[in-house]
Amino acid sequence: MQEILKICDRHADRLRWAVSQLQCHAPFDEHGLSRLTDTEIAVLDQFSVRFGKLQDVMGAKLFPAVLELTKEPGELKAFIDKLNRLEKIGAIPSADDWLLLREVRNTFAHDYPDDPELKAEIINRALDLTASLLDVLDSVKRFVQPYL
């Protein structure tokens, strides 16, 4: 659990940094995207990668580790069942909100070079949801603390 949390924290720290660097450009539009410098594009890439990696690690490793740590009964094969159990025990605020974060991550993972307006919309949505993603991580960390 500690190692998984360390990985999550590293992604979260780098995600926060990228967001802080991008705030002066938000909200993005198609014209703003075309005016970004190479360095700003690299920061945007950092944001995209860290958003996706944090969301991935939490869903694939942290959430199952929480269920294992709490010795939750029953075999939960479907991811939605795991999310619902995590919500029920208070580890995450909302299974539905997590599914939205996952949807945004999936959309964010695709590149839309021929549609800068759509790309800007996706970036803005991910920026808006970053606080929610980080809040879920904080919630899980608070929840597992008594078990560690």
Image (spheres, grey):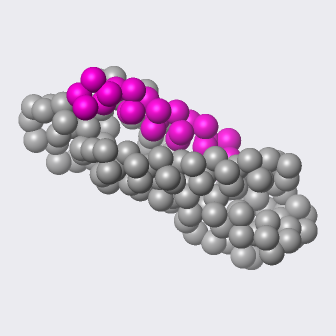
Q: Is residue 57 magenta?
A: no
128 displayed left or right of 41: left
The residue stretch that appears in magenta: 126-148
95 displayed left or right of 25: left
Q: Where residue 80 sits: x, y (%)?
A: 30, 42
Location of residue 42 (image quadrant): bottom right
Of residue 102 and residue 66, the one placed in the foreground of this image is: 66
Of residue 48 and residue 7, the one placed in the foreground of this image is: 7
Residue at 56% in and 36% down = 132
Residue at 49% in and 52% down = 10
Up/down of 4 relative to 146, above or below = below
SS majority, magenta = helix
Q: Where residue 125 sits: x, y (%)?
A: 67, 47
Location of residue 112 (image quadrant): bottom right
Up/down of 49 relative to 128, above or below = below
Of residue 76 and residue 40, the one placed in the foreground of this image is: 40
